[in-house]
Image (cartoon, rainbow, N blue to C red):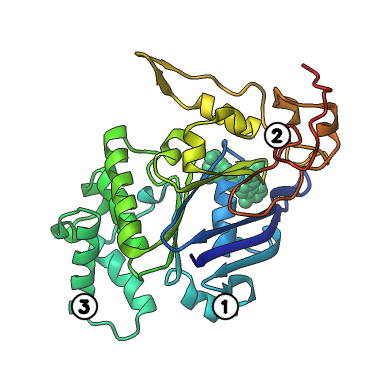
Amino acid sequence: MTAALVVDSLHLSYHTPNGPVPALRNVSLSISSNEILGLVGESGSGKSTMAQAIMRLVKSDVATIDGHVLVDGQNLYQLSPEELRLTRWKKISMVFQSSMNALNPVLSIQEHFKDTMEAHIPGISRKEIVERTSDLLEQVRLNPAIARNYAHELSGGMRQRVVIALSLALDPHVLIMDEPTTALDVVVQRSILDEIADLQQKRHLAVLFISHDFNLVSGLADRIAVMYAGEIMEITDRGMALEHVQDHHPYTQGLMRAAPRLNGTKVSIEGIPGEPPDMTQLTPGCSFYERCPMRMSMCRTTPLPTKTGSVYVRCHAMPNTETEKVQTSEF
Ligand SMILES: Nc1ncnc2c1ncn2[C@@H]1O[C@H](COP(=O)(O)OP(=O)(O)OP(=O)(O)O)[C@@H](O)[C@H]1O
Ligand SMILES: [Mg+2]
């Protein structure tokens, strides 16, 4: 399979009054056409930063960025502003976190599609805009008649479907979705997830699907990348994620236990004790050290192994890392 999106050694450090915040630390991943990669992690782990950095939306006065992002083999970080304008939204598109609340209240839904299409498809006719809008709305299972409506006249689920349809307006190959269903009730969430899976299949999209909900992602994604304090700790296959809990990174295991699940008739949820580290005070060892039930003394000081490949675990205590498991557990 061809990689539609390749992220290679991406570093991003926000400039803040308290010093640099390294929100992305040596992040690498790739997504094939026809694949959904889930990205999970707690609040503040760097998921939205990753999405915005991939889209090259973070300005240089806000953060220092280093690394490569290739879309269909083209490095977005080497494009001129005009080349970037033509590539963004057309080849790679994004549904922003909370974007269903960002539709312009004074524009009808049709006008949103018109603005997007006119900005990128020179000479497109009014008739074609209307036809393409109807088609896109139908693809997200909305009645095309709602094109005449304004955002406030639609339910949350309908607005989210509009935003997804807008992200597909220029027929991208890669789609990034940042928490696209978080604000919705579970029934609407379920039906939108089914539609995303359906659209991805029909359009052969490479999708980066971001969520803090491990259960939700494991039901949708082919592979899952687990992010903690700006790093990818693990990439796992969906199949692996649903069983063999003990083979995962201790943080992934914590996320799995923190996701609501049915035990007989009871729903049990266990949180992950402790807090994520202060991003301005990171130490060279594993950033999960303070919260890790499997930690060993070496984890405090020894950097995690760098891994490549479609699935991997970066943990000194896991048997498939190069580091031999040392019996110095502090617990
Ligand atoms: N513009 C900014 N300037 C400085 N720091 C920022 C900025 N945006 C994000 N950060 C910091 O970068 C880190 C990652 O934030 P980010 O929003 O990417 O996390 P997230 O995983 O998307 O969280 P959430 O689940 O809450 O959406 C956090 O420590 C955050 O405070
Ligand atoms: Mg976010």
Q: Where is residue 309 in the image (x, y as percent from the top left)?
A: 63, 54
Instruction: Give me the C-alpha separation between circle 1 and circle 2.
Output: 44 Å
Identify the residue under disc 2: 318
Label 3 SS: helix
Amino acid residing under circle 3: Glu
Amino acid residing under circle 2: Met
Q: Which residue lies furthest to the bottom in this view?
A: 123
Disc number placed over residue 81 in the picture, else none: 1
Amino acid residing under circle 1: Pro
Ligand 1, by image quadrant, is top right
Q: Which residue is drawn at 50% across and 47% down?
A: 223
Q: Which residue is drawn at 25% across and 60% down?
A: 109
> On screen, 266 above or below 189?
above
Label 2 SS: loop
Instruction: Give me the C-alpha separation between circle 3 and circle 2.
Output: 56 Å
The quarter of the picture where residue 308 lies is: bottom right
Query: Of marks 1 and 2, which one's residue comes earlier in the chain?
Result: 1
Q: Where is residue 322 in the image (x, y as percent from the top left)?
A: 77, 43
Q: Where is residue 40 in the image (x, y as percent from the top left)?
A: 53, 41
Q: Where is residue 126 in the image (x, y as percent from the top left)?
A: 21, 78
